C-alpha cells in the first residue's frame, strides 16, 4: 500500500484510535429515528444527554464490511462504460460544486451564478479532461439541485459527484440519473455518480444527512460522509484534533450505512482546512488544506478504502501568482499521497467563485503534476543505451539527439508538453490570464461533449416539469 | 503602578478573565462608581481590541477571549448598574433562520456583542419567523441579528423580515444579517439594515445602529 510521507501507518493507527475514543466517549448527536434505532439495536449506547456512544467493535465490524464492498468501487460513464475505479492508490481529479459567483469573461465582472453557467463550466471541464464532474455553479434558487444536475449530465458523459440541499433535492437528482441509466436497477448495477453526504461538525448527524445516507446505503449507491471539519472553526485548531474528529464522523456514518446495508459503499475522508483568524472565513488554499488531503489519503490507505480529496483551489479572486502557488501545492500533495477522488479543481475566493480560466489552468497543473511524480521508466527503451551508442558513434549519419528517431518517437510521452501559450522564452502577444480567456473561448466555440440521446433529454425535461 | 482601571483595560486586551474579575472587585472596594469602571476600564480595553483587530495585530480567538473577559467583568457590574438605573448600550436578539442548523457564527457574534456591553438574547437555530416576532415583543431589542450558513436557507432571512413587517414591528428594530453565503448586496435586497462579514464587524455594526437608534 502507498502511504504519504505526511502520515505513516503508525500515525494513521494513532489517529484511528483517537477517532474511536471520540465515538465511544463523546459520541454523536443523531436526530433521525431510524439511524438511532439502527445504532442502539446494534449495541451503541445512549448517554444521559441523549448522545449515541458508538463502541469500537461496531466500527471494526463496519470497516470489515466496507473493505469487502467498498475497497474497489467502479463508477461508469453516463453511457455505461467503466470510467473510474475508486480504490486506494488511484487518483482522479474533478472540479468543485456550489460556487455562488461566476467570473463573466465577457464583462470581466464577478456576478451571481445562473443555470447556463453550469452548462458552460461543465463543457470547459469536460474539454480540459477532468476525470469526474461536479456542478461548479449554484444559482440562488430554491430546489435548484435537480435542475443543476440535469445541466451537468447533458454536457458531459463523465461520472459525477453530486450535492443537494436536502433529501428531496438529492432524491430528485438520483431520479434523473436513474432516467438516464434506464432505471433504478441499471443505476445500481452501473452507478454514474457518487453522493456527497455530510454530517454537521462537530459530531451532529442531522435528519437530512441521515436520510440521504440511508437512501444511498439501501440502494447500494456509492457515497461520501464527508464532514467540513475546519481547524479552529468546526473542529480543534490542531490538525490531529481536526482529523480525529472528522474521521470519527466518517466512521460513525459508515457504521450507520453498513448497519442499513452491509454492502453499502462509501468513500472515506472529510474536508478540513483552516479558519482564517482575521476574517473567520474557511481557507481553500492554506497549507493546512494541502496537508489535510494527504492525511485523509493516508487514513484511506490505512483502512483499505478510497479517500475523498480536495485540491486545486485558491483563496485568491483571479488566476494570479497566489492562485498558481496555492492550487499547484495542493494538487501535488493530493497526487503524491494517492488521494482517490480529488475535487475542487479551480475553486477561487474561498470556494465562492468559479472562473473558467482556472479550470484550464488547473487542468494543466494536473497533467504537469502527473508528469512530475510519474514513476521512473527504467525499460530498455527508456534507458536508451542503443540511442546513446548511435549518437556517440554517429551511426547512420545521426550525430545529434534532436534528429534521432528515438526522440521523435518518445518526446511527447517523455516530456511535459505545455500549450503554445506557456511562456518559455518565446514571444507571447498577451498575458497568461488573457491567453487563458482565449483558451476558454476556444473550448466553448469548438468542444462538443458527447451528446445525450434526445429521448433521455425529453424524459428529463418531463420529469423536471412534473416537480 | 498604573491605576486599577488601566490595569482592567490591559486585562481585557490580554483576555485575562481571572484578573479582570479581581480588578473589578478591587475597583468597587475602592468605592468607584460601576458606570466609571465600565466606561473607563472595560470599554477602553475592548475599544483597543477592536482597533488592533482591524489593524491585523489581533486575531479572532484573541478577540473572543477579550470579549469573554469583558463579559466576566460586566457580570459583576450588571446588577449594580441596573440598581442605579444605568442602561446598557442595547439589546440584541440573535437566531439562525428556519431550516438552518448551524450556529457557530451566530454564537461568536453573541459572545462578542456581550463583550461589547449588549444584552444578548440567543433564540437558537432553525428559528421560524414567528419566534423572531415573539422575541421582539418579549425583549424589545434594538437589533435583530439573523444568521444562515447555507445558500438554501439564506432566503428564510427575507421571509422573516417580511413577517416582521406584516406583524407591524419593522420600525421597532434594526435588522442585521450574516453568515457564509450572505453579502452586503443580498442584505440590501432583502431590506436588512446591515450586514456583518464576520463577528467583530457585526458587533461594530450593532454599536453604530444602537447609537443611532
Image (cartoon, grey):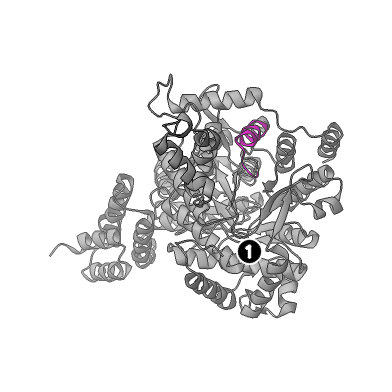
Q: Is residue A429 magenta?
A: no
- Indicate the quadrant where residue A459 lies: top right
**Image location (x, y in percent) of residue A180:** 82, 42
A436 sits to left or right of A32: left
Q: Is residue A129 magenta?
A: yes
| Residue sitting at x 49%, y 25% | A435
- Indicate the quadrant where residue B7 lies: bottom left
Which residue is at the front of the view, B149 or B89?
B149
**Image location (x, y in percent) of residue A266:** 68, 61
Quadrant, the C terminus of chain A: top right
A320 sits to left or right of A80: left
Quadrant, the N terminus of chain A: bottom right
Residue span colored magenta: A118-132
**Image location (x, y in percent) of residue A249:** 60, 66
- Indicate the quadrant where residue A149 lies: top right
Q: Main secondary structure of the magenta part?
A: helix
Q: Is residue B175 visible?
A: no
Total count of labels: 1
**Image location (x, y in percent) of residue A37:** 75, 73
Q: In the current view of this chain or complex, which residue is farthest to the top? A: A429
Amino acid at each position: 500500500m502507498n502511504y504519504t510521507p505526511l502520515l505513516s501507518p503508525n500515525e494513521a493507527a494513532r489517529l484511528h484510535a483517537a477517532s474511536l475514543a471520540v465515538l465511544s466517549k463523546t459520541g454523536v448527536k443523531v436526530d433521525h429515528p431510524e439511524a438511532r434505532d439502527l445504532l442502539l439495536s446494534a449495541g451503541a449506547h445512549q448517554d444521559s444527554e441523549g448522545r449515541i456512544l458508538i463502541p469500537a467493535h461496531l466500527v471494526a465490524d463496519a470497516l470489515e464490511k466496507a473493505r469487502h464492498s467498498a475497497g474497489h468501487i467502479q463508477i461508469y460513464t453516463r453511457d455505461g462504460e467503466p470510467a473510474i475505479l475508486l480504490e486506494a492508490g488511484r487518483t482522479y481529479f474533478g472540479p468543485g460544486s456550489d460556487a455562488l459567483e461566476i467570473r463573466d469573461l465577457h464583462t470581466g465582472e464577478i456576478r451571481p451564478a445562473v443555470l447556463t453557467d453550469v452548462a458552460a463550466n461543465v463543457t470547459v471541464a469536460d474539454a480540459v479532461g477532468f476525470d469526474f464532474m461536479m456542478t461548479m455553479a449554484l444559482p440562488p434558487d430554491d430546489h435548484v439541485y435537480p435542475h443543476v444536475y440535469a445541466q451537468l449530465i447533458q454536457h458531459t458523459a463523465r461520472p459525477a459527484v453530486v450535492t443537494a440541499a436536502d433529501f428531496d433535492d438529492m432524491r430528485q437528482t438520483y431520479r434523473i440519473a436513474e432516467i438516464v441509466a434506464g432505471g433504478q436497477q441499471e443505476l445500481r448495477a452501473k452507478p454514474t455518480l457518487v453522493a456527497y453526504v455530510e454530517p454537521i461538525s462537530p459530531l451532529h448527524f442531522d435528519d437530512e444527512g441521515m436520510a440521504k445516507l440511508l437512501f444511498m446505503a439501501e440502494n447500494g449507491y456509492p457515497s461520501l460522509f464527508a464532514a467540513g471539519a475546519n481547524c479552529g472553526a468546526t473542529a480543534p485548531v490542531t490538525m490531529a484534533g481536526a482529523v480525529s474528529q472528522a474521521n470519527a464522523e466518517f466512521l460513525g456514518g459508515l457504521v450507520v450505512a453498513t448497519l442499513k446495508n452491509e454492502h453499502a459503499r462509501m468513500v472515506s475522508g472529510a474536508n478540513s482546512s483552516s479558519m482564517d483568524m482575521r476574517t473567520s472565513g474557511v481557507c481553500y488554499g492554506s497549507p493546512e488544506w494541502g496537508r489535510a488531503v494527504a492525511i485523509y489519503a493516508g487514513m484511506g490507505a490505512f483502512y483499505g478504502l478510497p479517500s475523498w480529496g480536495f485540491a486545486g483551489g485558491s483563496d485568491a479572486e483571479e488566476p494570479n501568482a497566489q492562485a498558481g502557488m496555492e492550487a499547484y501545492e495542493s494538487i501535488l500533495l493530493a497526487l503524491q499521497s494517492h488521494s482517490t477522488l480529488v475535487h475542487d479543481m479551480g475553486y477561487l475566493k474561498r470556494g465562492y467563485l468559479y472562473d473558467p480560466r482556472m479550470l484550464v489552468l488547473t487542468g494543466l497543473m494536473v497533467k504537469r503534476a502527473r508528469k512530475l511524480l510519474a514513476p521512473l521508466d527504467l525499460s530498455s527503451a527508456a534507458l536508451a543505451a542503443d540511442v546513446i551508442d548511435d549518437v556517440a558513434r554517429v551511426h547512420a549519419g545521426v550525430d545529434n539527439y534532436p534528429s534521432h528517431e528515438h526522440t521523435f518517437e518518445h518526446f511527447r510521452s517523455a516530456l511535459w508538453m505545455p500549450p503554445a501559450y506557456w511562456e518559455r522564452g518565446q514571444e507571447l502577444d498577451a498575458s497568461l490570464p488573457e491567453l487563458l480567456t482565449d483558451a476558454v473561448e476556444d473550448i466553448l466555440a469548438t468542444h462538443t461533449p458527447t451528446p445525450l440521446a434526445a429521448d433521455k433529454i425529453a424524459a428529463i425535461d418531463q420529469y423536471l416539469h412534473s416537480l | 503602578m498604573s491605576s486599577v482601571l488601566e490595569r482592567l483595560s490591559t486585562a481585557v486586551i490580554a483576555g485575562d478573565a481571572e484578573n479582570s474579575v479581581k480588578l473589578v472587585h478591587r475597583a468597587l472596594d475602592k468605592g468607584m462608581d460601576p458606570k466609571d469602571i465600565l466606561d473607563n476600564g472595560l470599554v477602553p480595553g475592548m475599544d483597543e481590541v477592536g482597533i488592533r483587530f482591524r489593524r491585523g495585530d489581533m486575531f479572532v480567538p484573541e478577540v473572543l477571549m477579550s470579549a469573554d473577559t469583558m463579559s466576566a467583568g460586566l457580570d459583576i457590574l450588571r446588577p449594580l448598574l441596573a440598581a442605579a438605573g444605568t442602561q446598557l448600550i442595547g439589546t440584541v436578539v440573535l437566531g439562525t433562520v428556519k431550516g438552518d442548523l448551524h450556529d457557530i457564527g451566530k454564537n461568536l457574534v453573541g459572545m462578542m456583542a456581550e463583550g461589547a456591553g449588549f444584552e444578548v438574547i440567543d433564540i437558537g437555530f432553525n428559528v421560524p419567523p414567528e419566534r423572531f416576532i415573539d422575541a421582539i415583543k418579549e425583549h424589545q431589542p434594538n437589533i435583530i441579528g439573523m444568521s444562515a450558513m447555507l445558500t438554501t436557507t439564506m432566503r428564510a432571512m427575507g421571509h422573516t423580515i417580511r413577517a416582521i413587517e406584516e406583524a407591524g414591528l419593522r420600525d421597532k428594530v434594526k435588522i442585521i444579517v450574516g453568515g457564509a453565503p450572505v453579502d452586503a448586496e443580498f442584505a440590501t435586497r432583502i431590506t436588512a439594515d446591515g450586514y456583518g462579514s464576520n463577528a467583530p464587524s457585526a458587533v461594530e455594526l450593532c454599536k453604530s445602529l444602537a447609537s443611532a437608534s
